[in-house]
Image (cartoon, rainbow, N blue to C red):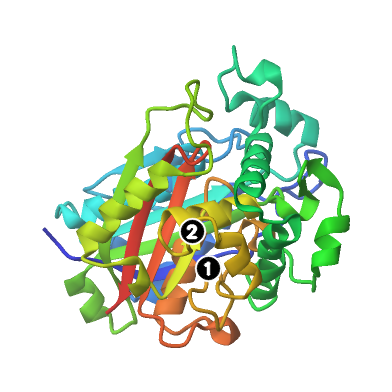
């Protein structure tokens, strides 16, 4: 099997990009993404003729062009002996795209594969977006009629965590403040204005105890990663990182369990993390930096605990104390996280991989983590009832 590297990563800044239907000029997904592909290939110092596979995140339902992957192959004029396909896995979509592109290289089907996608959703009315996506993620017969949406079950996590550990809302919301400080240093971030804990607590209530600034915005984005064999990476003359390990686990539960379970244990993340550490030959204390898929502030705390990066039941306290910020013991979401970097949901894990690439190749500028050599990323489904993890290491 080939050793797999991440050789390049390019993206547009996260934000509001999608055109309104009545706008005289329209932003087109394929034009936006093609420029990102061009940039990433130039960064990798490889030609498009060397690309043998393209694994896409399936565009959002609002994208008019269907069969998007094969359309893009034609638009870019790229002939591939490996897979040209789209993947959809809700919050895990970008992680599965990365995983599948890795396999194309690892299994020798090609020496260069792209993991890429575009996500446009911000010009769609909020009520339409809620009905077509958020309310339909749970069991539409038994969960959706009760009003469950992802934010509501994360809010229940927060209440339970506060009850069991004594954590305060201020401690949980300190995640948002920390992530905003990171985002202020990230040119790809959607929100970069200073923010205080008072701002978070005073923002519009969403689902108790979470407020507007505890939860993710709606976001657009486009990103392309270049995965390559070690041979191609070495010949490119460009900086690269190496995939060291992966782990995954699915509990066989859809969104919210219908049987009694520990709702804040995030057992799937714990199991995926153990598989990752076993595969990579690492322990949690050897991780220098982590980018975790955490739509809400409470989620960052719980998944970091499940992965062994923070102490069980002490994650909120340790976050408030600065352990997860730049300069802290284990910097988490130096990109700004979902709350401030932004959350183009089908691409978020790819943006997380981009952040690790920049950090591990010392290209993160003012948010650079000193001495970062080993980075972890994790993404999820439902109430973290499934998780997919990867570790990248400086070459």
Q: Residue 231, relative to residue 176: is it above or below?
A: below
298 left or right of 177?
Answer: left
Residue 186, percent from left and from top: 63, 74
Report how far apart the C-alphas of labels 1 and 2 lie in the structure.
8 Å
Residue 338, percent from left and from top: 62, 56
Residue 230 or residue 249, whichever sits in front: 249
Q: Residue 340, relative to residue 62: is it above or below?
A: below
- Residue 237's image quarter? bottom left
| N-terminal label among 1 and 2 | 2
Judging from the image, what secondary structure is the residue with disc 2 in? helix
Judging from the image, what secondary structure is the residue with disc 1 in? loop
Q: Residue sitting at 67 percent across and 70 percent down? A: 178
Residue 348 or residue 80, whichever sits in front: 348
Whether pointer 1 and pointer 2 mark residues with C-beta atoms closer than 8 Å, the reply is: yes
Q: Given the current orientation, which residue lies at the most extreme left position? A: 1
Residue denoted by label 1: 332
In this view, the mark in front (1 or 2):
2
Residue 304 circle label: 2
Give the quadrant of the N terminus: bottom left
Q: Residue sitting at 41 percent across and 42 percent down? A: 267
Give the quadrant of the C terminus: bottom left
Residue 238, percent from left and from top: 33, 82
Q: Residue sitting at 56 percent across and 74 percent down? A: 323
């Amino acid at each position: 099997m080939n050793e797999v590297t991440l050789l390049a990563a390019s993206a547009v800044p996260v934000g509001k990009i999608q055109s309104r239907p009545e706008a005289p000029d329209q932003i087109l997904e394929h034009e936006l993404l093609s420029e990102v592909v061009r940039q990433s290939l130039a960064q990798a110092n490889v030609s498009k003729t060397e690309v043998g596979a393209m694994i896409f995140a399936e565009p959002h339902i609002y994208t008019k062009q269907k069969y998007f992957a094969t359309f893009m192959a034609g638009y870019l004029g790229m002939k591939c002996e490996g897979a040209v396909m789209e993947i959809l896995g809700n919050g895990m979509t970008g992680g599965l795209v990365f995983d599948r592109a890795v396999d194309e290289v690892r299994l020798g089907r090609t020496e260069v594969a792209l993991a890429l996608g575009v996500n446009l959703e911000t010009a769609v009315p909020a009520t339409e977006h809620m009905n077509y996506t958020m309310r339909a993620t749970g069991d539409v017969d038994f969960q959706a009629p009760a009003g469950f949406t992802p934010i509501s079950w994360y809010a229940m996590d927060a209440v339970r965590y506060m009850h069991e550990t004594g954590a305060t809302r201020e401690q949980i919301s300190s995640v948002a403040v920390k992530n905003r400080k990171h985002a202020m240093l990230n040119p790809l971030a959607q929100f970069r204005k200073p923010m205080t804990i008072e701002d978070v607590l005073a923002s519009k209530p969403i689902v108790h105890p979470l407020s507007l600034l505890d939860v993710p915005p709606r976001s657009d984005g486009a990103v392309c990663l270049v995965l390559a064999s070690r041979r191609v990476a070495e010949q490119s003359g460009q900086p690269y990182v190496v995939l060291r390990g992966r782990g995954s686990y699915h509990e066989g539960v859809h969104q919210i369990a219908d049987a009694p379970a520990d709702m804040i244990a995030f057992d799937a993340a714990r199991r995926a993390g153990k598989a990752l550490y076993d595969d990579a030959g690492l322990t949690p204390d050897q991780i220098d930096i982590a980018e975790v898929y955490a739509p809400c502030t409470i989620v960052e705390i719980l998944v970091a605990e499940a992965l062994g990066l923070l102490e069980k039941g002490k994650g909120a306290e340790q976050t408030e104390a600065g352990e997860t910020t730049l300069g802290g013991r284990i910097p988490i979401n130096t990109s700004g996280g979902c709350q401030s970097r932004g959350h183009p949901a089908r691409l978020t894990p790819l943006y997380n991989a981009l952040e690790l690439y920049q950090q591990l190749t010392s290209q993160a500028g003012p948010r650079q983590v000193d001495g970062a050599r080993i980075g972890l990323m994790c993404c999820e489904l439902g109430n973290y009832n499934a998780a997919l993890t990867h570790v990248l290491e400086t070459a």
